[in-house]
């Protein structure tokens, strides 16, 4: 079973939601996290944060590209004098699949969906489309989210990408949830309230309440017509 955790933008909670999702699946074999492209490494790393929030049983794949400045990937790459090669990321994914069989993989996106990876305008959405994995959209529960979430859903759908649902991050807001489900024709699979403190313990607790009926897992399994899960 594999899923991409994308979002309406940067700092929206993709890493925290990835950690909760991975903690939800912890204990099964081959639970793996992967951030293929990371920027802002000088301020810490998502891979390290997820590893510490989930625990030692988590497998973390190395990033294909990692840049220190907290910039859009195309800019961070330019400053480092390199060009991001999507094929390198796709072949790392294929190698992982060949070696891990039916493991559980959570891939975290970078910023929002239309973030450019290359100077020629190859977008994160192009990469995710090529990976051909269902996308879970993390968005804020608060004011402004309806517009941002609907824009992201439209961008996914217009590219024929598969949507696994929405996770609302922040204080519960029933009207925003209803509006996103109704106008976005989608399902809010979970609401994640602020964790205080953000720690392995609070992530584990949130995981035990995250999608308790396993709706997301059922959808992810069904989204693979070849039965690959
Ligand atoms: N539910 C939450 N409870 C507590 N803290 C949170 C929660 N969601 C997000 N945060 C905090 O907000 C900040 C941004 O969250 P996070 O790193 O998950 O965002 P992101 O979308 O992964 O960002 P990036 O685009 O840099 O990858 C972090 O400092 C994180 O600890
Ligand atoms: Mg992150």
Image (spheres, grey):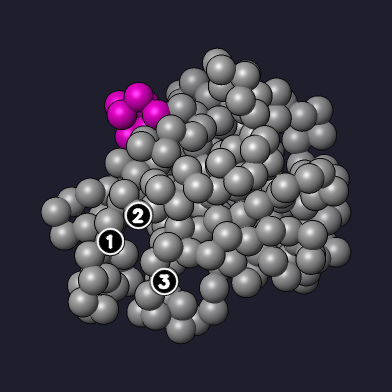
Name the N-terminal-most of marks 1 and 3.
3
SS for callout 3 = strand
Q: Quadrant of the C terminus?
A: top right
Q: What stretch is highlighted in magenta?
A: 155-161
SS for callout 2 = helix
SS for callout 1 = loop
State if disc 3 and disc 1 touch (CB < 8 Å): no
| Residue matched to label 1 | 84
Q: Which residue is farthest top? A: 225
Residue at screen point 56% across, 41% down: 98
Place residue 173 in its image quadrant.
top right
What x and y, as percent, mark residue 164? 55, 30
* Crowd class of label 2 (few under 14; some 14 to 19; many from 20; radius 10 Å): few
State if disc 1 and disc 2 touch (CB < 8 Å): yes
213 relative position to 189: left or right: right
State if disc 3 and disc 2 touch (CB < 8 Å): no
Check residue 35 in the rendering and tell me which mark sits there, or answer none: none
């Amino acid at each position: 079973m594999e899923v991409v955790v994308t979002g309406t933008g940067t700092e929206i909670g993709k890493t925290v939601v990835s950690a909760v999702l991975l903690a939800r699946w912890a204990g099964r074999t081959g639970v793996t996290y992967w951030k293929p492209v990371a920027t802002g490494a000088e301020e810490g790393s998502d891979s390290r944060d997820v590893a510490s929030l989930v625990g030692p049983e988590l497998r973390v794949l190395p990033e294909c590209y990692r840049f220190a400045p907290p910039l859009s990937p195309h800019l961070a790459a330019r400053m480092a004098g390199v060009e991001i090669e999507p094929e390198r990321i796709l072949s790392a994914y294929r190698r992982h699949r060949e070696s891990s069989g039916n493991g559980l993989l959570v891939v975290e996106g970078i910023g929002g969906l239309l973030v450019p990876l290359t100077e020629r305008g190859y977008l994160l959405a192009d990469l995710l489309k090529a990976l051909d994995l269902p996308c879970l959209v993390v968005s804020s529960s608060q004011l402004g989210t309806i517009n941002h979430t609907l824009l992201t859903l439209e961008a996914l759908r217009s590219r024929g990408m598969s949507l696994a649902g929405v996770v609302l991050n922040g204080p519960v807001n029933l009207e925003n949830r209803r509006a996103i489900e109704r106008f976005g024709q989608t399902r809010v699979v979970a609401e994640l309230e602020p964790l205080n403190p953000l720690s392995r313990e609070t992530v584990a607790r949130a995981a035990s309440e995250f999608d308790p009926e396993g709706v997301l897992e059922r959808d992810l399994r069904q989204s693979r017509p070849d039965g690959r899960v």
